[in-house]
Each structure stands twice: as C-alpha cells, then as structure tokens.
C-alpha cells in the first residue's frame, strides 16, 4: 500500500514510524516532511501542508491508497473533504467537524448546548461590549481568540488592566488577524491538566493512553507558551475512575453532540482536560493528534495503526480491540535557543553516540543541506524513551537529549517532574 501523510513535524514523524510497522505498507510520502523524516518516508518539500491542490494532485498522480492529514490548518481548510472528493480514503475529520478546534465559539456553544462540562463563558464580537463586561468580572479571567492562532491565542489576565490589554491585543491590534474578531471570555479553572487523544469513527471512541504536556518554555512552568516542550505518558492524575467519568460526561456526549449537529467527527479527537475540584472539564478540543503528545502515546500502541485508521475511515472501529503497552514514555524536546520568539536556524546537528533500542529520535524542525542535517525550526527534535517506569523513561530521554549537539540547543530540565511528584515512579 502507498500512504501519504500531510505535515512535517515530530508528530508526523511518530505517525510515519508507526505506520511503517505494517508489512503491507510499501511506500510513505510525507508532504512536506522534513530532513529527518526522509529516513522513513519520501519527503516532498515543495508541497506544503496547506497546499490542498498540490496534495490532491499528488495523491491522484501517485496512486495513494490511504492518506493521513495530521495538522490543524489543512483539516480546517477541508483537505479531507478534497481527498474524499477525489476518491482517496483518509484519516482525519472533514472541515465541518474540524470546527471543534478551528472555532472556539463553535466548541463552547456545543458544550453549553449538550451539557458537557467546561468553563463558564461569554462570546464577544465587539471590543466595547467585552470591555464593559470585564468591568464587573472576577479575576483571573481567560480570553481566547475564536480562530486558529498557533496555540498562542489564549491570554490569562490577572487583573482588569491586563484583561483590557488582552482585548486590545486580540480585537483591536488584531495580533492574530481574523482569529480575534470574535473572542471567548471564560472562567479561570484550576487543577491538573491531562491530554487524552482518542480514535473515533463518529460512533465508537477508543481513548489512547493519557499524557501530560509541558507547554511553557521554562523550567517550573514559567515563561511563554510554546507548542509543547515535552510530554510523559501515562498521566498519573488520570485514574481509572476519572477516565470512567470522562467517558460518561465528556467523550460520549461530545461524539453524540457532533452527530446531532450533522458533523460526525472521524479521526483523532484530542481532549484537553482540567481536573477541577468540581470534576473534569474541557479546556479545549483539538481535531488532530497533539504534538508532542503523539511522540509518547503512539510508541505505547500495540495494535497496528493503519488497521485502526482504516477502521475509523470505514466506521468499523467497534470491531477492533485497540491495545496499549503498560510501559511509560517520556519525550524531551530540543529547541532552538530563543524559541518561541526569535531563533536562528541552519545550525548543523551532531549525534555524539548511537541511541539505545528503547529511544526514538523524532525530527520536528530540520532539513538536509549538502547531505547533513541542520536546524530549520523552533522545535528541532524530540527524544522519546520507553521503559517500565517513568523514572527510567526520563533518564533514557535525557541521556539521549544530551547526546545531541547543535549551536543554541535549548531544553527544559524538568519534564516529568510534576508527574513524579503526583506519585508515578
Ligand atoms: P489552550 O490553547 O486552549 O490549550 O490554552 C492554553 C493553556 O491555557 C491551557 O493549557 C491551560 O493551561 C490554560 N487555560 C486555557 N483555558 C483555561 C481556563 N479556562 N482556566 C485556566 N487555564 C486555562
Ligand atoms: N501539545 C498541544 C497541542 O498539540 O495542541
């Protein structure tokens, strides 16, 4: 079988490595892919993830049997709709279902309508109305741009003054463009955060192993928000009792709600949850695999990934037992110094010693230049180790991280520390 994967980061590398385990897979094309991914797939750097015409034409001309659309932008733009129209089976939601991520207003209104627990909220399209509401609001308060904003469209305001500034940033300065024309202003929640990715064909849901992201750039969860500086799985806060509550109050009701609204969700649905004193609540939905959650979750998957993805597409997921290893995984991201703000690229990457068999290096932001790998993005590599305990997995991931060198290499040194404190060994 010939497969196509849209995207070119660490998440896509993890998906590709897992798909390759199926002996029926003869070829995988990555559009655009990246330098390191080219060891595992044929990369087409000329076709970017948002180039829907390029993607569909490529799929048709190369006889692609199955496509996986991984990033949010092409999903929101209707890449899956276009591939389906061209007769190509694929994994991922159509544009209508992808609104669960691409419009926070859609997601919040869905949750309110169907009684799915989430932070209380108001929607504003007019900055004056937002400012008037904030005069009497409780702080801290959370302001979110409606549309996709590279994970940066969420501002937490500690005071009225900060909240006024956030309205200015989102709605008046339009720092995130049209994404901020409508905003959600919501209650500030507290509690541990858990990421749960789930396979769903619109009717059946198979949650994956839970995970914990580390979104802030600095140790101790300080500094700016990033795409994620590291992950561990499973998440020790996510007990079987909590998983059962989430299935009953969040996961199944979300599937039912999407069907009811005429946009059944097929693909990977990502639940960003907060375990509040009042029970688990949804912080956000994503319509795709998380990055770098995928780099700790998929290594623990025992069932063949392509078989699951085909079952999602064919709406036969109920016939598949999705099985997981009970090991632990840890992923440490190596970033370019300065990320998530200004950083330099083009730095040669050196691997000073071979990785042991329980370690995988996922390439996120690099390219081949004159036959050698150089940095090309903010997040450059993700080192994942799998081991019987989280402590061992972390030791393996950090040892591997220290065996890679490039100028300006930056990493957090406390990935997994919170999970260890929460009682995982
Ligand atoms: P998001 O991009 O929606 O995942 O938000 C980024 C981060 O902001 C989340 O991971 C949370 O840590 C935080 N956040 C978002 N919404 C809330 C909320 N209602 N209360 C507290 N923190 C929040
Ligand atoms: N790691 C968070 C995300 O993928 O949205």
Image (cartoon, rainbow, N blue to C red):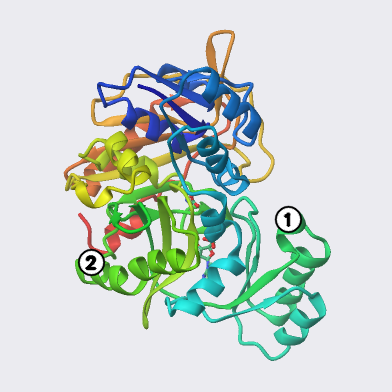
Front-most of residues 39 and 236 = 39
**Vertically, is 130 above or below 174?**
below
Residue 278, x across and y down, in percent:
37, 83
Marks 2 and 1: in contact by CB < 8 Å? Answer: no
Mark carried by residue 239: 2
Front-most of residues 94 and 418 = 94
Q: Left or right: where does residue 175 sit relative to residue 12?
A: right
Kindly tell me whether mark 2's CB lies below 8 Å from ligand 1.
Answer: no
Q: Left or right: where does residue 266 sit relative to residue 299?
A: right
Residue 128, x across and y down, in percent:
82, 80
Q: Which residue: 53% across, 35% down?
A: 83
How many residues crowd mark 1 within 10 Å: few (<14), some (14–19), many (20+)? some
How many residues crowd mark 2 within 10 Å: few (<14), some (14–19), many (20+)? few
Q: Which residue, as the protein is rendered here, is positioned at the far bottom?
A: 136
Q: Secondary structure at mark 1?
A: loop
Q: Left or right: where does residue 50 sit relative to residue 326?
A: right
The quarter in which the C terminus is drawn is bottom left
Q: Is residue 34 visible?
A: no
**Vertically, is 218 above or below 344?**
below
Kindly tell me whether mark 1's CB lies below 8 Å from ligand 1.
Answer: no
Q: Is residue 29 visible?
A: yes
Mark carried by residue 176: 1
Q: Which residue: 18% across, 48% down?
A: 321
Residue 257, x across and y down, in percent:
44, 69
Residue 303, x across and y down, in percent:
21, 39
Query: Disc 1 to disc 2, how far (Cα)?
Result: 37 Å
Q: Which residue: 67% across, 80% down?
A: 159
């Amino acid at each position: 079988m010939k497969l196509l994967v849209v995207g070119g980061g660490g998440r896509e590398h993890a998906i590709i490595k897992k798909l390759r385990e199926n002996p029926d897979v003869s070829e995988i094309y990555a559009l655009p892919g990246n330098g390191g991914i080219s060891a595992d797939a044929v990369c087409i750097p000329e076709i970017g993830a948002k180039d829907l015409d390029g993607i569909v034409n490529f799929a048709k001309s190369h006889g692609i049997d199955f496509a996986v659309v991984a990033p949010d932008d092409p999903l929101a733009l209707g890449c899956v709709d276009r591939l389906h129209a061209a007769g190509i089976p694929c994994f991922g939601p159509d544009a209508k279902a992808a609104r669960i991520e691409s419009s926070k207003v859609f997601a919040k209104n869905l949750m309110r309508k169907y009684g799915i627990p989430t932070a209380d909220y108001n929607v504003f399209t007019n900055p004056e109305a937002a400012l008037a509401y904030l005069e009497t609001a409780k702080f801290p308060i959370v302001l979110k741009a409606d549309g996709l904003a590279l994970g940066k469209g969420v501002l937490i305001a500690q005071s009225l003054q900060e909240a006024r500034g956030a309205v200015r940033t989102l709605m008046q300065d339009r720092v995130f463009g049209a994404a901020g024309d409508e905003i959600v202003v919501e209650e500030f929640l507290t509690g541990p955060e858990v990421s749960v990715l789930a396979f769903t064909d619109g009717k059946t849901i198979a949650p994956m192993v839970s995970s914990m992201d580390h979104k802030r750039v600095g140790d101790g969860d300080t500094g700016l928000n990033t795409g994620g500086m590291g992950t561990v799985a499973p998440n020790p806060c996510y007990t079987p009792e909590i998983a059962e509550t989430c299935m009953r109050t969040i996961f199944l009701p979300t599937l039912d709600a999407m069907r009811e609204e005429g946009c059944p969700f097929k693909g990977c649905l990502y639940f960003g949850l907060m375990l509040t004193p009042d029970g688990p609540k949804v912080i956000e939905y994503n319509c795709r695999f998380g990055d770098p959650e995928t780099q700790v979750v998929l290594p623990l998957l025992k069932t063949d990934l392509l078989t699951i993805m085909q079952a999602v597409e064919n709406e036969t997921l109920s016939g598949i037992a999705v099985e997981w290893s009970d090991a632990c995984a840890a992923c440490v991201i190596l970033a370019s110094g300065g990320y998530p703000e200004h950083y330099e690229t083009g730095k040669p990457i050196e691997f000073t010693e071979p990785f042991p068999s329980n370690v995988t290096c996922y390439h996120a932001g690099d390219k081949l230049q004159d036959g050698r790998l150089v940095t090309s993005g903010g997040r450059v590599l993700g080192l994942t180790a799998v081991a019987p305990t989280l402590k061992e997995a972390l030791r393996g991931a950090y040892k591997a991280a220290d065996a890679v060198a490039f100028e300006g290499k930056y990493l957090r040194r406390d990935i997994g520390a919170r999970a260890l404190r929460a009682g995982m060994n």
